[in-house]
Image: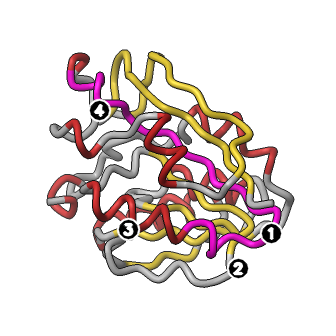
Amino acid sequence: MWDERYAGDDYVYGTEPNDYLKAQAELFARDARVLCLAEGEGRNAVYLAEQGLNVVAVDGSAVGLAKANRLARARGVSIETRLADLAEFDLGQDQWDGIVSIFCHLPPEVRQALHQKVFNSLKPGGLFVLEAYRPEQLLFKTGGPPRAEWMMTADQLQEELAPLHFEQLQEMDRPILEGQGHTGLGAVVQAVCLKV
């Protein structure tokens, strides 16, 4: 499905970073090692690399990751890409200074298992940055999966990401203009979590 969606020359979600991630990017130390989950065509990974971070982008679409590498070359930076199914991907132990999850919508059991791996895979002091659609997004029809259970709420994140410390956690409706894929008002949840 995603190979087909990414098959054209256009970048489905644009080439600019997610607004929420851009606002949080300064939280990462220069040279930090950051993992971008479900990174698709690479807009967020490339932006973080432009900020001097060492970025690994993981996605299940070879087509998307090829476009991510192409975008990185065009911007004069390099990223590492890994083709993997997040249901089986090993995040490692004490590996990452940061993990980024921007609109990474998965079946609930896969998402819950992935979130449980986040704590162990972050280094002490590591950050987890997330923006995702809430179930209310189905009313807006401006992007995101067609199933409410693939979306997230603040309460779910508090449960799934324990024992991380929440530096930020908020639900809001905000305009999202990211290529053709996300265009219009969006119902989102945003979080920044710290491994203490």
User: In the image shown, does 116 or 188 lie closer to the viewer?
Assistant: 116
Q: Quadrant of residue 175?
A: top left
* Side of 173 where 25 appears, left or right: right
Bounds of the magenta span?
A: 118-138
Q: Residues within 10 Å of mark 4 (few under 14, many from 20)?
A: some
Is the residue under label 2 in contact with that under label 1 (CB below 8 Å)? yes
- SS at mark 4? loop
Q: Position of residue 146 (x, y in %)?
A: 16, 37
Q: Image height check: is 87 above or below 68? A: below
Colouring of the image: secondary structure
**Residue 180: numbered disc:** 4
Of labels 3 and 1, the one closer to you: 1
User: Does residue 194 appear to the left or right of 144 in the view shown?
Assistant: right
Numbered badge on residue 124 = 1
> Which residue is under mark 3?
59
In the image, what residue type sits under mark 2?
Answer: Asp
Is residue 80 magenta-colored?
Answer: no
From the viewer's side, name the closer residue of 181 and 135: 135
Specify which label sits upstream in the sequence, 1 or 4. 1
Label 1 SS: strand
Tell me the residue that label 2 is attached to: 94
Q: Is residue 133 magenta?
A: yes
Residue 183: x %, y % from top left? 33, 24
The CA span between labels 1 and 4 is 38 Å
40 relative position to 16: left or right: left
